[in-house]
Every structure is written in structure tokens, then in C-alpha cells.
Amino acid sequence: MAASTPTPTPDLSGGPVLLSVSLGSIILALSTTFVRFCVRAGINKHIGADDYTSAVATVVALVGTIFGIVESTTPDPSRALEFDILGQPWYLMSVTLSKIAICLFFMGLLGRARQWRILLGVLIFLMAAVNLAFSLTVNLQCRPLEKLWKPSVTGDCWDPNVQLNFGYFQGAFSVFSWFFLALFPILIVRDLRIEGNMTWPFYVSSAISFACGIFSIVRTAETSQTGGLSVYTSNTFCASVMANLEQNLGLIAANVLTLGPLFSAPARHPPSRTASKRAITRTTSRASSRRTASQSSNRSSEIDVKRTTHLIIQGPRRMSASSENGHEEYDLGDGHRGSIDSLDLEAWPRGIIKTVSVEVFEEINPDHVPNGIKRSRVDSAERVSGTSVVEEQDWEAMLRAGPPGPVR
């Protein structure tokens, strides 16, 4: 006579561990969801389809975690198995929605890359179909469903191998999708040409997705050891822990992709034209005051002073000394020419055309001074801590005055 297989002894010793894992992981997942929406609404000023999908995944994960908490705290093995079975569809739905949120994020980021968008769209469809089918099989394998955790109840169930084989298929596809989502950010991050401080969310999400794939492997292996048994064993506990980790860490992987702007440097905006005009006016006023003081205190001094200075030459280039209307003609940049009177000093320059550092030895010639410009007298003693505070020529006035007239 063949010996009958002994019935496993119920094991609820892992309840505190399951409770700790469930609470810790869901709190972290809820926190990342909250930060995600703060970044989207406060910094990006836009909430998209991936954000709404992540929000739904968070709600579903919260429901699944509640089932896990009840499972870990109940002293009745039959009731613990009941909440484990009832929680499985919620785990799968949350994981699937998290994966879909990741795919939608990349589809919005890729823009016109049609091939990648089609691939991600097909993956979304397959994930939704496979996990929906598995959730239905979990709830339809026995009629009534209560027979799964109470074998004494009158009813009918499928062959346990049917559910076991479909569980293998679902687990294998889940592992494939997680590993694909782990490699996908690494494949495209260089092509997107994203700044260095904005790429870290891609690598973090990739690492978490890879870990979720490992959890899915362990969950599938442990679930296969419980097929056909209506007893809560250590394998059931381990599968439930892996399902909780896969669910909540998968949600974190979806949320962390959007947190790049939270740690990026703020954009530096150029000063407005009004602010620039005021700064130029103040600088011109200070230069004029220094010229006046220098001229009044050095009228009797000699004008044979040599000085060395560094100039940044940046501005319109002189093309000819005369034109049709009698004014000088200058190269204003971008292929345009015109007189200095036609130059919009507030709007120009529109960027640095050319910057040259030149060392100039200047010797003022008193006989060659443009009309309307008084001779400047320079005191070489006006230098403070290596910074030149000597008088500067009013180049704008010299350009407007034109070439000097003949000396009489």
C-alpha cells in the first residue's frame, strides 16, 4: 500500500517579518509618489498620463499592502491563506500599472522615435493582457473561491497543474518585462543627450527594476512549491514577502524617474534689458566723475605718460571713413552694415562676436584730439591694489564725433 503524502504543518512564524516589510516598503513608495506630484506640479507645471497611472498604482498597492498586513497579523492559518490569495490580484495589478507608468514616461520622453514608442506600446498591451488573465484565473480556479483555503467546503476546482503552469508563464513574462525596463534606460540615456545631473534617475530606476526582476524569480519559485496545498506554509510566507517587495519597489522605480529636476541646478536667467541699461548708466556716471576729477587736478601736469592696460575689444568694426550720407560706416555683425547712429545700443550686442585680449601702450597726442573731446590728463599714481582706476576714453563720443579735423 503506497504511503500517503503528509499534510504540511501551518507556519505563521514569519508574520512579524512580513508586517515590517509591508509597512516599510509601502511608506517609502507613498513618499516617492508624493514627491513625484510635488515635482510635476511645482517644477514641471505639467501632470501627464504616466503620473495618473502611477497614482492609480499607488492606490492599488495600498490595498494590496493592507491584505498583506492582515495576513501577517492573523493567528488563524486558514485566514492568513485567505488574505494571501485575495491579495495576489492586487499585487499583480499594482506591479503592472507601475510598469505601464514607466513605459508611458519613456514614450513621452522619446517624442518622435516611432520604433521605440511602438515597442513600448506593444509591451504595455502584453503586460496588461497577461496579468489580467492571471488575475482572473486566480479568482476562477475554484467555485466557490472559499474552497482554496477551506478544503472541506463543497465545490469544484481546476486541476492544480493548470494554475501552476500559467503561474510559471506569468512569472517568466514578469521577469522578462522587469529586465527589459532595467536595460531600456541605459540604452537610450546617451541618445537623449540629457545633462549629467539629470541622468541619475535613469540609473537608479534601472537598478531597482533589476532587483524587482530578482524578486519576481523568487516569488515564482516559492509559489510553485505551494500548488494544490490549502495550508499556509513558509513557502507561502516567502512568496508573499517577495510580492510585497516587487509591488512597492516597482512603484518606487516608476516614481524616481521624475525626480531629476528636484536635484538639478536652477536655471540662470540673463539680466533684463532694463537692468542692463541701469547698470551701464551707473558705470558711465562713475567714469565721468573720475574724468572730471582727474582733469581738474592735473591741468598743469605733462601729457607724456605711458600706460599699459588690458582692453576687451568688442563692438562694431569700422569699415570706411565716409559714406553717402557723410557718416562713418561700421560692420554691425551678422552681415549688416550701417552708421553708428543706427545702432541700437540697448539691444546690441546680441552675443559676443569676437573677444580679444590686447595689451596696449597708449601715448596721448595733444595735437590729435577729436572734435568735442577734451584732452585727458592721466595721473599714473591713481592705481589702487593693482586695479587701474585711470580715466577711460569716451569711445562712443569719439565714434560719433568722427575723424579729427585738420590741425591749424
Image (cartoon, rainbow, N blue to C red):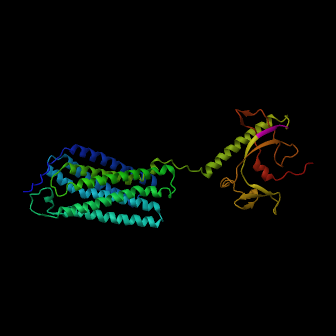
Q: Write the start and end of the magenta stretch as one range.
A: 304-308
Looking at the picture, tell me which residue is in the foreground, 139 or 4.
4
The N terminus lies in quadrant: bottom left
By secondary structure, the bulk of the magenta-drawn segment is best described as strand
Please tell me whether residue 150 is drawn above or below residue 312 in the rendered image: below
- The image quarter in which residue 157 lies: bottom left
On the image, the x and y values in percent for residue 82 come to 17, 54
Q: Residue at x 25, y 63 (%)?
A: 166
Q: Is residue 301 left or right of residue 356?
A: right
Q: Residue at x 75, y 60 (%)?
A: 338
Q: Nearer the viewer, residue 261 or 2?
A: 2
- Figure quadrant of residue 89: bottom left
Q: How many marks?
A: 0
Percent position of residue 331, x then y: 75, 58
For residue 63, say whether it is visible.
Answer: no
Q: Is residue 352 visible?
A: yes
Residue 390 location (% of width, % of height): 75, 38
Q: Is residue 256 left or right of residue 368?
A: left
